[in-house]
């Protein structure tokens, strides 16, 4: 079941996210946010954009949301997308289902352009692979830019790429 996230989901979503903060360079966040801070993020994002969770057998397996791409009115047709899956639930199609549901909700809201900001390794290592880039490519995103050695985590430098997908025409 895919549904809208609620502030009551914050503890489980933070549990999923914490793994990535502590063990990967998928996020460049260094410290795990507090539960209160994370709940606030859910409330803030949900006020304007879709924030979805995928639940199976009453357990949240992952989440995806859209957020501000740039804070100017000219960009109101664009969003940045984000997805995190429980590390034990990868490869089951849940991410694809979440992103598809997110795209449908965004289309209803008049969004045309999706952007994903992705940590990308100079060389794959135990903290970061190209899996996120490959996932987004399979979802129809194309790479449009790369910043070099802009993220530093685990005493290593990482690149960041931007990927883009159009989900509606631009009349």
Image (spheres, grey):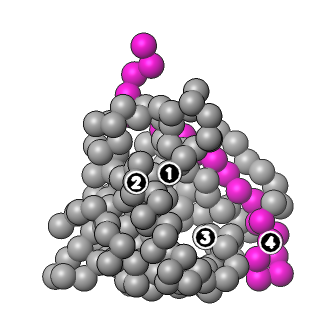
Who's the residue at 27% across and 61% down the image?
4
Q: Which residue is mark 4?
A: 152
Position of 11 relative to 150 (above/below): below
Q: CA distance from mark 2 to mark 3?
A: 26 Å
Q: Secondary structure at mark 1?
A: strand
**Left or right, 55 with reference to 130:** left
Q: Secondary structure at mark 2?
A: loop
Who's the residue at 67% across and 51% down the image?
161
Q: Which residue is mark 1?
A: 67
Q: Which mark is residue 47?
A: 2
Task: Name the N-terminal-most of marks 3 and 4.
Answer: 3
**Near-viewer residue (62 or 139):** 62
Position of 161 relative to 10 (above/below): above
Q: Secondary structure at mark 4?
A: strand
Foreground tag (1 vs 2): 2
Foreground tag (2 vs 3): 2
Query: Which quadrant holds residue 149?
Result: bottom right
Task: Name the N-terminal-most of marks 1 and 2.
Answer: 2
Q: CA distance from mark 3 to mark 4?
A: 11 Å
Foreground tag (3 vs 1): 1
Q: Which residue is mark 3?
A: 26
Q: CA distance from mark 1 to mark 4?
A: 23 Å
Task: Name the N-terminal-most of marks 3 and 1.
Answer: 3
* Residue 129 percent location from the top left of the image: 61, 69
Query: Which quadrant holds residue 46?
Result: bottom left
Q: CA distance from mark 1 to mark 2?
A: 10 Å
* Residue 97 percent location from the top left of the image: 28, 58
Q: CA distance from mark 3 to mark 1?
A: 18 Å
- Residue range of the region highlighted in magenta in the rendering: 151-171
């Amino acid at each position: 079941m895919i549904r809208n996230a609620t502030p009551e989901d914050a503890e489980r979503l933070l549990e999923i996210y914490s793994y990535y903060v502590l063990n990967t360079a998928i996020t460049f966040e260094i410290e795990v946010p507090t539960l209160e801070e994370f709940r606030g993020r859910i409330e803030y994002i949900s006020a304007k954009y879709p924030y979805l969770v995928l639940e199976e057998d009453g357990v949240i397996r992952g989440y995806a949301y859209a957020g501000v791409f740039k804070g100017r009115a000219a960009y109101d047709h664009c969003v940045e997308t984000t997805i995190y899956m429980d590390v034990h639930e990868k490869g089951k199609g849940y991410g694809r289902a979440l992103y598809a549901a997110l795209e449908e909700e965004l289309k209803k809201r008049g969004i045309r352009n999706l952007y994903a900001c992705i940590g990308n390794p100079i060389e794959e290592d135990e903290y970061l692979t190209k899996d996120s880039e490959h996932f987004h490519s399979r979802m129809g995103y194309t790479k449009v830019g790369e910043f070099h050695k802009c993220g530093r985590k685990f005493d290593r430098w990482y690149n960041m790429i931007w990927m883009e997908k159009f989900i509606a025409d631009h009349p």
